[in-house]
Image (cartoon, helix red, strand yellow):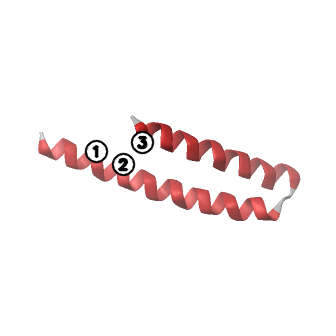
Amino acid sequence: MSRVSELQGLVDSVSAEMEKFYDKGNKAAGTRARKGLQDLKKLAQEIRLEIQAQKNAS
């Protein structure tokens, strides 16, 4: 379940950066949000592969 908390933490941080970008016009926050979204994509793919491997092992 540590993957779930890691995923939730990334979502929370990206959400905060997106709020800064859209509501306050902070361009640096947009860069951080894009990086965070890329990290989310990478983590989601890793989790998908783990799930598939565990499913196929059964």
The correct choice, above or below, for 32 with respect to 18 in the image is below
Tag 2 secondary structure = helix
- Residue identified by numbered label 2: 47
Q: Which mark is residue 51?
A: 1
Q: Choose the circle earlier in sequence order: 2 or 3.
A: 3
Marks 1,2: beta carbons within 8 A = yes
Q: CA distance from mark 2 to mark 3?
A: 8 Å
Nearer the observer: mark 3 or 1; the answer is 3
Marks 2,3: beta carbons within 8 A = yes
- Residue at 87% x, 52% y is 24
Q: CA distance from mark 3 to mark 1?
A: 11 Å
**Where residue 6 appears, x then y in whole percent?**
49, 43
Q: Which mark is residue 3?
A: 3
Q: Nearer the viewer, residue 37 or 3?
A: 3
Tag 1 secondary structure = helix
Instruction: Judge from the rendering whether residue 42 lies leftward or rightward of residue 28; answer left or right.
Output: left
> Given the image, on which type of amino acid does mark 3 rest?
Arg
